[in-house]
C-alpha cells in the first residue's frame, strides 16, 4: 500500500481552480416539476427510480410508488412493523421491484406501476439485507441457512435461484459487477471489513485498504472500489481506491485542500473517470457557524480537479444525466440541492428546499429530492442523460443454490396467543407496538402462562383456550420481567426498580406487596417465593423479604460480566467473585448467602468475553462467551469435569458482543433455546447439537426480538414477542428423536 499523503496539498495548476475561487455569482433557480407529501415527519429513507415509477421508502418503512411525471401515488404497501429501525429494502430491475420486508423469510417482486405480485421466493430464514446488481440481471439477499450467513442471488424477472455464497456480513451496496458485504465491528453501525462478491457467479474476494479500524463502502465503478477508513470519534478519514481484478489497494489519501479543514468523509462517488468525495463536520450551524461540507473532485491518480464552495454537499453526490446532484442541510443553515457541472464543479441550477434533504436519486431526465418533513420533489434535468444499457445475464449455479435442510426435532407449534394489546402508550404518551416481552409458566406442565409487557400490566393466560384469566391494575411502568414460584405465586419487575408480588385468590390473583429494589438488570425469586433477589447497579446483589421489601442480605459481585447475564434458576444464583464463578444457594441466609460451589472461570478466552452464566440444574452450569462473530455456550459440570461446547456463528448479529444472548435451557439440560438480535430464534437438541430454526416449525419469522422460557417439565416452550410483538407462541414436544450414538474412535 502506498504511504498515506494529503490530497490537494498544493492547488497550483489544478483544473477548475479559478472557477472554484472566483466570486460567487447568482445561481439559476430550478423550480420543481412536482412536489408531494410521501412520508411522515423524518422524511423518506430512500428513493429508487424505476421504469414507470419512483419507489419511495418512507420513514415508517412503507413502500410507495409515485408516477414520475406527476407525483401521483400509484400504490402503497405498508410496513409490517411501522418502525424506522428496519425498513423495507428494494432492488429495481426495469419495470419490476424486488422487496425484502423486515422479519419476512421471503422476497417478493412487484410490477412497479401496479404493485401486483409477480413472484415470491421463500428463504430458510428472514432476509436481512438486499441489493440489486448494477450491471448484471441479479438481485442478492443475505439470510441464514443452516446456521451459516449466506448471500443468495436470484433472477429478477422470475425469482430463479442463481448462486449462493457464505459471507461475513450484510450487503452494503453494488457496482463494478459486484455486490459488497460489510462485517460488523460489534458496536453500533460500525463495520471493520469489506467483501466483494462477483454478480456473475458469487465468487468472494476480500477488500483490504487502510490499517484504521473501521471501513465503509463509498462507490464502485469501472473495476475500482472506493472506500473510507476511520477511527471512532471526530476524526478525518482516509479514502482508498482498490482494483477489483487483483484486490490490490492503489491509493489511500486524506481529503482536503489548502486552507480548508480536514473533516470526516460523508459520501463519495466514482463517475466518468472522476473521484468525488464529500466531507463535513458533525455540528449544526446554530452551534457552530463555520463553513463546512465541501465536495472535492480528483482524477483516479489523485490529481485535484476542483472543489465547491462550502455548505454544498452533506451526503454522497448522485450522477444525474450529464450533471451531479448534491444537497446540503443542517439546523441553522439554508437547506438546498444543486446541480453541478461534473467537469468544473460550477453550479448549473439551485433547488431551494424547505427542510433538510434526506435522500437523493435521479433517472435520465429528472432529479428527485426527499426532505425531512416527508416531501418528495422532482426537477427536470437541464442536461438529460441516456437510458441505461441492458444488464448482462447471469447463469444459474444449481449446486450452489440448494438450501440446507433443517432437521425435525419433535417440536410443534401448539398455539399463538394474543397476550398483549396490539398497541400501547409509552411514558411519553405516544402509541407504540404492544410488546409481550416477558413470559413464564405458572405450573410445571405449562398450562398457565404469566405475561408482562409495555402496557404496565401483567396477565395470566390459559394456554389451552387462549383466554385471559386475570389482568393486574396499572403498575406504573413497563413490566420488564416476570418470575413464577412453585405454588402459583409470581413476581413482576417494572422499569424504574419496583417489584410486585402476586398470589392466587380463588380463581384470580391479588397483589400481596410492592417495594423498591433498586434499578438493576437482574431479578429473580427463590422457588418458594421466600426471597426476591435483585442487583442494584453497584456490583451488589440483594436479598429482599417479598412481604416487606426489606433487604435481608447482600453479596458483592465484582467482575466484568454484565449482570443481565446472571439468573436465578431454581434455588441457585451464579455470580462473579474473585476466583471465578460462584454458585450461591439463594435460600441460605443464616450468615448471609453462602457460596455452595466455586467454578474456576476466566473473564476472557479465545472464545471471547464471559457474558452469561447460570445453573441448568444441581449438577450443571451454563456459561456463554461471545466475540464479534461467534458465541460459545458451555455446559460445565459444577463438581468438575469436561465441558460440552456449542458454537454459534453470530455473523451479522445486531448486538454488541458484551450483551448476552437471549436463551433458556430445560431443567434436564436436553433442550436449548437460542436467540441473538438479527439471527433466527433456534431450538437445539443439546445431546446431538441438532438445530432447528423456529421459523421451520411455525412458518413464521420473529417480529424483531424474542425471549423464551421452558416449562418445568421441559416439554413446553413459550416464546414472547413471536411472531408479532404482542403475541406469545407456545411450542410442545410430541416425540423427540433419540440422541445419536457418539462416533467411535
Image (cartoon, rainbow, N blue to C red):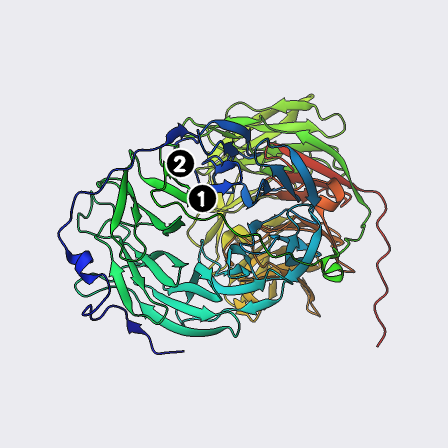
Vertical side of 703 occupied by 231: above or below:
below
In front of the other: 625 or 205 = 205
Give the residue displayed 60% in from the left and 28% down from the top. Answer: 420
Question: Can residue 441 be spotted in the picture?
Answer: no
> Which quadrant would residue 361 be assigned to in this image?
top left
Relative horizontal placement of residue 457, taking residue 714 as reference (left or right): left
> Which quadrant would residue 744 be assigned to in this image?
bottom right
Residue 187 x %, y %: 45, 57
Question: Can residue 405 be spotted in the picture?
Answer: yes
Dot 1 surroundings within 10 Å: few (below 14), some, or many (20 or more)? many
Q: Which mark is residue 43?
A: 2
Dot 2 surroundings within 10 Å: few (below 14), some, or many (20 or more)? many
Secondary structure category for the residue under label 2: loop
Residue 267 x %, y %: 37, 55
Residue 335 x %, y %: 27, 40
Distance CA(mark 2)–CA(mark 1): 20 Å
- What residue sits right under mark 1 in the picture? 363
Amino acid at each position: 500500500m502506498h504511504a498515506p499523503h494529503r490530497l490537494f496539498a498544493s492547488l497550483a495548476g489544478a483544473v477548475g481552480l479559478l472557477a472554484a475561487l472566483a466570486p460567487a455569482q447568482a445561481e439559476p433557480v430550478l423550480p420543481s416539476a412536482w412536489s408531494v407529501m410521501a412520508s411522515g415527519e423524518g422524511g423518506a429513507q430512500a428513493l429508487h427510480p424505476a421504469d414507470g415509477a419512483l419507489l419511495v421508502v418512507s420513514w415508517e418503512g412503507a413502500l410507495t410508488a409515485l408516477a414520475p411525471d406527476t407525483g401521483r401515488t400509484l400504490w402503497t404497501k405498508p410496513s409490517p412493523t411501522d418502525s424506522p429501525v428496519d425498513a423495507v429494502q428494494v432492488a429495481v430491475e426495469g419495470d419490476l421491484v424486488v422487496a425484502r420486508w423486515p422479519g419476512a423469510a421471503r422476497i417478493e417482486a412487484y410490477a412497479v406501476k401496479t404493485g401486483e405480485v409477480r413472484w415470491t421466493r421463500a428463504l430458510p430464514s428472514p432476509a436481512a439485507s438486499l441489493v440489486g446488481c448494477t450491471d448484471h440481471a441479479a438481485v442478492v439477499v443475505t439470510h441464514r441457512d443452516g446456521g451459516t450467513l449466506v448471500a443468495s442471488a436470484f433472477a429478477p424477472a422470475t425469482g430463479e435461484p442463481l448462486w449462493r455464497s457464505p459471507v461475513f456480513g450484510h450487503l452494503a451496496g453494488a457496482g463494478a459487477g459486484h455486490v459488497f458485504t460489510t462485517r460488523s465491528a460489534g458496536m453500533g453501525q460500525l463495520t471493520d471489513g469489506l467483501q466483494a462478491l462477483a454478480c456473475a457467479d458469487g465468487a468472494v474476494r476480500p477488500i483490504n485498504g487502510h490499517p484504521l479500524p473501521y471501513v465503509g463502502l463509498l462507490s464502485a465503478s469501472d473495476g475500482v472500489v472506493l472506500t473510507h477508513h476511520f477511527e471512532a470519534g471526530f476524526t478525518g478519514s482516509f479514502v482508498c481506491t482498490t482494483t477489483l481484478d487483483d484486490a490490490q489497494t492503489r491509493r489511500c489519501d486524506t481529503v482536503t485542500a489548502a486552507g480548508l479543514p480536514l473533516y470526516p468523509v460523508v459520501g463519495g462517488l466514482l463517475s466518468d473517470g472522476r473521484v468525488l468525495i464529500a466531507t463535513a463536520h458533525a455540528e449544526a450551524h446554530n452551534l457552530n457557524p463555520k463553513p463546512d461540507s465541501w465536495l472535492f473532485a480528483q482524477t483516479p491518480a489523485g490529481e485535484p480537479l476542483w472543489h465547491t464552495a462550502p455548505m454544498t454537499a452533506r451526503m454522497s453526490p448522485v450522477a444525474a444525466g450529464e450533471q451531479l446532484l448534491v444537497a446540503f442541510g443542517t439546523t441553522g443553515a439554508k437547506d438546498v440541492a444543486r446541480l453541478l457541472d461534473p467537469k468544473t464543479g460550477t453550479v448549473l441550477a439551485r433547488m431551494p428546499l424547505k427542510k433538510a434533504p434526506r435522500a437523493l436519486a435521479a433517472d435520465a431526465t429528472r432529479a428527485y429530492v426527499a426532505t425531512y418533513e416527508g416531501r418528495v420533489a422532482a426537477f427536470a434535468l437541464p442536461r438529460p442523460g441516456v437510458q441505461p444499457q441492458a444488464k448482462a445475464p447471469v447463469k444459474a449455479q444449481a449446486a450452489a443454490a440448494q438450501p440446507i435442510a433443517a432437521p425435525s426435532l419433535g417440536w410443534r407449534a401448539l398455539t399463538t396467543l394474543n397476550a398483549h394489546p396490539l398497541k400501547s402508550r409509552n411514558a411519553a404518551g405516544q402509541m407504540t407496538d404492544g410488546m409481550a416481552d416477558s413470559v413464564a409458566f405458572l405450573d410445571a406442565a405449562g398450562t398457565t402462562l404469566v405475561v408482562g409487557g409495555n402496557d404496565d400490566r401483567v396477565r395470566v393466560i390459559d394456554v389451552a383456550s387462549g383466554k385471559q384469566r386475570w389482568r393486574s391494575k396499572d403498575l406504573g411502568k413497563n413490566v420488564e420481567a416476570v418470575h413464577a414460584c412453585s405454588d402459583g405465586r409470581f413476581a413482576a419487575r417494572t422499569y424504574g426498580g419496583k417489584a410486585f408480588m402476586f398470589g392466587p385468590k380463588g380463581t384470580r390473583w391479588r397483589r400481596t406487596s410492592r417495594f423498591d429494589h433498586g434499578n438493576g438488570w437482574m431479578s429473580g425469586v427463590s422457588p418458594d417465593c421466600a426471597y426476591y433477589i435483585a442487583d442494584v447497579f453497584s456490583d451488589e446483589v440483594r436479598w429482599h423479604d417479598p412481604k416487606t421489601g426489606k433487604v435481608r442480605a447482600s453479596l458483592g459481585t465484582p467482575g466484568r460480566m454484565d449482570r443481565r447475564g446472571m439468573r436465578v434458576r431454581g434455588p441457585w444464583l451464579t455470580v462473579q467473585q474473585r476466583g471465578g464463578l460462584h454458585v450461591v444457594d439463594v435460600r441460605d441466609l443464616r450468615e448471609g448467602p453462602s457460596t455452595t460451589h466455586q467454578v474456576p472461570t476466566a473473564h476472557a478466552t479465545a472464545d471471547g468475553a464471559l457474558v452469561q452464566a447460570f445453573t441448568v440444574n444441581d449438577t450443571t452450569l451454563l456459561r456463554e462467551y461471545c466475540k464479534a462473530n461467534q458465541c460459545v455456550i458451555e455446559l460445565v459440570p459444577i463438581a468438575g469435569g469436561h465441558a460440552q461446547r456449542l458454537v454459534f456463528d453470530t455473523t451479522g448479529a445486531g448486538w454488541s458482543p458484551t450483551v448476552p444472548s437471549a436463551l433458556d435451557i430445560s431443567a434436564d439440560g436436553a433442550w436449548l433455546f437460542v436467540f441473538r438480535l438479527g439471527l433466527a430464534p433456534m431450538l437445539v437438541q443439546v445431546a446431538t447439537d441438532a438445530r432447528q430454526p423456529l421459523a421451520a416449525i411455525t412458518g413464521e419469522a420473529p417480529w424483531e426480538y424474542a425471549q423464551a422460557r421452558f416449562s418445568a417439565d421441559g416439554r413446553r416452550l413459550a416464546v414472547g414477542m413471536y411472531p408479532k410483538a404482542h403475541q406469545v407462541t407456545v411450542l410442545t414436544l410430541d416425540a423427540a428423536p433419540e440422541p445419536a450414538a457418539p462416533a467411535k474412535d
